[in-house]
Image (cartoon, grey):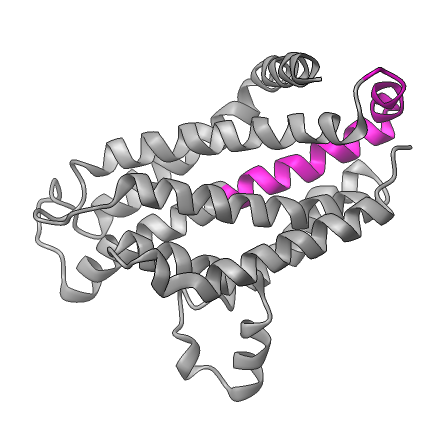
């Protein structure tokens, strides 16, 4: 069982790397965006000192922004790949192998988590020369938080992949669902200044809890202070996995 899972995961990694643009978009582009925006906002290597608001964004907002960008990139890629495999009959053929269905889908999750970890590691290595002097970043805790958030968002991706009609519509539908959530997550505009109706909507969206968890852990908050965020993401994962198991189509 495990041997088959690892073999399929390795095969999916090689298939992913055969498409250079996909690998560049997943690994390179988020790190480049992080460096370019960080320098523009006044990182340590910038010629001019950062303003107070820019320093706050560089210290707290930018890492969370790029981490969520990495996670959403992984999810949209997953939705597209699953849809392509279904449309091409690959899922149907894989299901006929001795591998159990959940092992086949787990291989895709492992690939996305692996590349998420690689991209996040590169981002944090680059950030050592970019973050303001004196900032103490809990890198390991933040990496764990990003992987937890990615798992929760991936579970939503499986629901979308189960319902999209064709591969051509997979990524646009995913973007239409996720990016409005991103806008209401509290990263760009504090939830307190939103109209009451939008605050209620935001509190029902998983990305709100993703932002809260990532921002809190990045700034040194304790895990115990974010039990509500973890619970919300756990509920999201359980509900989406249960739903996708009922509506997922292999062909």
Is-magenta flag for residue 179?
Answer: no
Residue 182 shows up from this direction:
no
Looking at the image, which is closer to me, 123 or 96?
A: 96
Instruction: Determine the main secondary structure of the stretch shown in magenta.
Output: helix
Q: What is the quadrant of the N terminus in the image?
A: top right
Q: Is residue 20 above or below residue 170?
A: above
Query: In the rendered structure, which segment of residues is drawn in magenta?
Result: 71-98
Drawn side of residue 195 relative to residue 7, left or right? left
Q: Magenta stretch: residue 94 in it?
A: yes
Report the residue at 39% width, 52% height from top.
65
Question: Where the C terminus falls, by quadrant?
Answer: top right
Tell me which residue sits at (33%, 29%) in the image.
122
In front of the other: 231 or 133: 231
Query: Where residue 233 appears, x then y in whole percent?
Result: 55, 57
Q: Is residue 114 left or right of residue 97?
A: left
Residue found at x 84% / y 40%? 166
**240 to 224, vertically: above or below:** above
- Outermost bottom residue: 196
């Amino acid at each position: 069982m495990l041997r088959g899972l690892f073999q399929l995961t390795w095969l999916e990694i090689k298939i992913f790397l055969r498409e250079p643009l996909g690998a560049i978009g997943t690994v390179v582009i988020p790190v480049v965006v992080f460096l370019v925006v960080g320098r523009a906002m006044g990182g340590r290597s910038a010629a001019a000192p950062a303003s107070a608001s820019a320093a706050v964004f560089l210290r707290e907002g930018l890492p969370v922004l790029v981490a969520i960008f990495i996670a959403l990139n992984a999810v949209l890629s997953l939705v597209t790949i699953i849809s392509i495999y279904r449309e091409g009959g690959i899922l149907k053929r894989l299901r006929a192998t001795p591998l159990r269905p959940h092992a086949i889908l787990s291989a895709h999750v492992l690939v996305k988590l692996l590349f998420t970890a690689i991209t996040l590691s590169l981002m944090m290595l680059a950030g050592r020369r970019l973050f303001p002097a004196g900032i103490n970043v809990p890198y390991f805790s933040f990496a764990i938080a990003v992987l937890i958030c990615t798992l929760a968002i991936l579970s939503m991706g499986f629901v979308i992949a189960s319902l999209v009609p064709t591969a051509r519509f997979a990524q646009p539908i995913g973007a239409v669902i996720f990016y409005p959530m991103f806008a209401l997550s509290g990263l760009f505009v504090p939830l307190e200044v939103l109209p009451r109706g939008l605050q209620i909507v935001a509190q029902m969206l998983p990305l709100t809890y993703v932002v809260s968890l990532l921002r809190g852990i990045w700034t040194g908050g304790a895990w115990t202070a974010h039990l509500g965020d973890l619970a919300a993401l756990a509920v999201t994962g359980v509900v989406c996995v249960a739903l996708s198991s009922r509506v997922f189509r292999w062909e």
